[in-house]
Amino acid sequence: MVMQRVVPTANTSHEFIGTSLVYRDAPRASGSEIARVSLARFAQFVVAYNIAVIVWGAYVRSTGSGAGCGSRWPLCNGEFLSTTPQTQTAIEFTHRVTSAVSLVLVAILLIWCWRRTAKGDWPRYSAVVAALLLFNEAFLGALLVLGGHVGGLGRSATHALFLCLHFGNTLLLLAALALTASWLSNRDRPLGMVLRPFQMIGMGLGLVSVMVIGMTGSLASLGDTMFPADSLRHAVVQDFSSSSHILLRLRVLHPIAAVIGSIYVLWLLQTFWRKQEHSRWTPFLAVTLAGQIALGAMNVILLAPVWLQMTHLLVAEIFWILLVLASADQLFAIHDSDVPPSRKKSAAANRNLALKTTGHISRRGGPSS
């Protein structure tokens, strides 16, 4: 004879069918989990897509195609769909289309996060920040075009200033999107500020220094494109000649900023190592740092060909994302060692109570003769 009992609980309804315990709320929980995973994967796709759009934007700059659609924005030469067969027009038009798709994807991510996360969840607010930064990205791009700073490779100081602002905004956008994807993928992980104020200030300055690397790198890339050198010796002479264009003399800032930013990265890696609480991003961060140094040296030796500039930028974006995620692990994540003993005891007591309750239910619902 098989006894069947329904034991009520506070949160979950379940019943025994034969000797199997069936949870009536299981399908609902499973559907919620699937939705959460789908949202996290979509956020990861948005990050990858925006990386591709940024790399293509670098190709637009390196090939001098920024004026391919004239001084009209968002239309291309006054047309909704460009029919001009010129290569530069096709390159710039493709960049505008992919950027528009990026706006749509980030808007979908924002709405999806807002519907699937609760009030106070961090992914909700990081998605809002990402949307605002993307609209600012489009605004800065429009000012470059409408202000006529893209024609002839834009040798004006205004173009250089907007280029720095644009790339700095790009890095902040990637940081917001990457944090959104990471937090959505680890919803069960508690978050909170765990560093002292002076440590937070140091971390902020370190991240800003790495952003300066990217902004000075964009200036160096613009100088390489506008004033190509025929030899390494000629390039070095250009950097230190008083008669050289200001962009060429500013190229030396990039390696200086790279050294300063690398100090912060090494400090972060050393901090994880000392605490023996390695971030999951730490090994990848160390590898990409070495790769960036190698690519930077190749860029100088080979006189910055377009394909190498794009590769350098791609790895730089990946490096920046890994650095932001590793810094977030250091700043926000509450590790097991940070949890007070009283909370650990309370959590252990709750687990023991749950196990006892489950065992009691199983014994009462088991077969008897």
Image (cartoon, grey):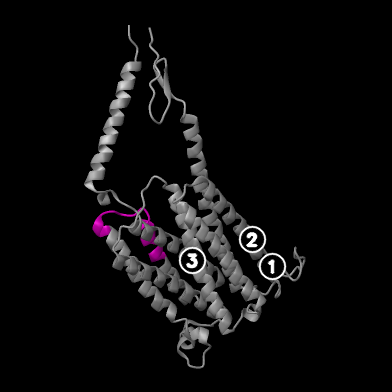
Residue 164 % position (x, y)? 51, 75
- Label 3 amino acid? Leu
Residue 345 or 58: which is nearer the viewer?
A: 345
Residue 363 % position (x, y)? 31, 18
Whether residue 75 is situated above or below residue 19 in the rendered picture: below
Q: Is residue 279 magenta?
A: yes
- At horizontal 47% and vertical 83% (from top left) the residue drawn is 250
Residue 171, disc: 3
Label 3 environment density (alpha carbons within 10 Å; few <14, some 14–19, many ≥20): many
Label 1 environment density (alpha carbons within 10 Å; few <14, some 14–19, many ≥20): some
Kindly report the distance in space between the C-alpha atoms of the residues bearing marks 3 and 2.
18 Å
Residue stretch rendered in magenta on the structure: 273-291
Whether residue 192 is situated above or below residue 146 in the rendered picture: above
Whether residue 90 is situated above or below residue 231 in the rendered picture: above
Q: Secondary structure at mark 1?
A: loop
How many numbered discs, if any? 3
- Label 1 amino acid? Pro
